[in-house]
Image: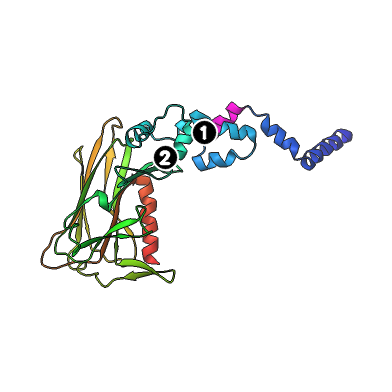
């Protein structure tokens, strides 16, 4: 019995001193089994596991794994919005394509999917909205900035009447979505490599609140109001949520930002974009904004 125990210990020590023996055991696992296990992981974890060895790398590219991570409308996004055919594309490559920034509608809109859960996100830039007075440079200007994903924001110098609105028609996957306006008070520039906010034009936002509004083609409506007071900080202002139950039909949403009390002027507002994302991602976004504001 002692001899058997000694033999077992020697065998264990041999295995520890020879790491290649472990590697061979992993490679002996059937690729289909590895792929099945990987299908329960999220995309970043799948990619990480694919670096273990050749067997895991091959398994991590299986179409059935990545199809389950893609949104149900991925063909619509690729073919209708981006003009790309899905024929011959691996599902992993489709996921990689959609998880990056994809611009459409003349570069005024952007779509991407979340790398962790495949949730569909869309953004509409200020040039993709209707802004009252935007053509009169006494009131509005487009300014370039690397703080916008579109590299441009609309800047209000001074005006009596604020009205910004837009719409979007899209085939959303089933789920609950949130819509935000991304705004900032003050004009940011770089001076000697440092971020500097000019608040000279900021006024009028503490007198009356701005109003945000959201309506959808299925009858949902949301209205919210707030005073703007965060100078030099980009904030995602939550407009409202909407629910999509049928992923096969187009959902049309309309959104607006207004402050039409003409008893006073207001100015110094940067309008960057409107963001639409799954409500699960919206909670992370608002938590991040709250953290920045309280610093």
Which residue is pictured at 47% across the width and 39% down the height?
96
In the image, 267: left or right of 198? Answer: left
Classify the position of the C terminus by image quarter: bottom left
Classify residue 144 by image quadrant.
bottom left
Residue hosting label 2: 98
- Rendered location of residue 2, percent (x, y): 88, 36
The label on residue 23 is: none
For marks 2 and 1 on the same chain, the one whose residue lies earlier in the sequence: 1
Residue hosting label 1: 39
Residues in magenta, as a range: 31-40
Q: Is residue 32 above or below residue 258?
A: above
The kind of secondary structure the magenta stretch mainly shows is helix
Q: Is residue 239 visible?
A: no
Classify residue 154 by image quadrant.
bottom left
Q: Residues within 10 Å of mark 2 (few under 14, many from 20)?
A: many
Classify the position of the N terminus by image quarter: top right
Q: Are marks 2 and 1 in contact (CB under 8 Å)?
A: no
- Rendered location of residue 165, percent (x, y): 20, 50
Q: Residues within 10 Å of mark 1 (few under 14, many from 20)?
A: many
């Amino acid at each position: 019995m002692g001899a058997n125990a000694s033999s077992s210990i020697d065998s264990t020590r041999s295995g520890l001193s020879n790491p290649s023996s472990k590697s061979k055991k992993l490679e002996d696992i059937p690729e289909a089994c590895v792929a099945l296990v990987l299908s329960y992981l999220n995309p970043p974890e799948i990619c990480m596991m694919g670096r273990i060895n050749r067997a895991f790398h091959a398994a991590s590219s299986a179409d059935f794994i990545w199809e389950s991570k893609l949104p149900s409308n991925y063909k619509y996004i690729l073919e209708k919005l981006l003009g790309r055919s899905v024929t011959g594309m691996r599902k992993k490559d489709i996921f990689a394509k959609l998880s990056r920034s994809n611009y459409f509608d003349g570069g005024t809109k952007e779509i991407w999917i979340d790398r962790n859960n495949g949730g569909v996100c869309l953004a509409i830039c200020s040039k993709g909205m209707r802004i009252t007075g935007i053509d009169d440079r006494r009131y509005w200007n487009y300014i370039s900035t690397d703080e916008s994903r579109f590299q441009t924001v609309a800047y209000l110098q001074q005006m009596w009447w604020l009205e910004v609105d837009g719409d979007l028609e899209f085939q959303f996957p089933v789920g609950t979505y949130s819509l935000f306006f991304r705004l900032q008070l003050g004009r940011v520039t770089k001076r000697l490599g440092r971020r500097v906010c000019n608040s000279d034009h900021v006024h009028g936002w503490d007198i009356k609140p701005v109003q945000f509004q959201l309506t959808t083609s299925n009858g949902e409506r949301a209205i919210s109001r707030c005073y703007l007071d965060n100078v030099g900080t980009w904030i995602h202002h939550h407009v409202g949520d909407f629910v999509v139950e049928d992923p096969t039909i187009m959902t049309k949403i309309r959104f607006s930002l207004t402050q039409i009390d003409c008893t006073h002027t207001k100015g110094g507002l940067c309008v960057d974009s409107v963001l639409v994302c799954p409500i699960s991602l919206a909670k992370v976004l608002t938590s991040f904004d709250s953290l920045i504001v309280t610093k």
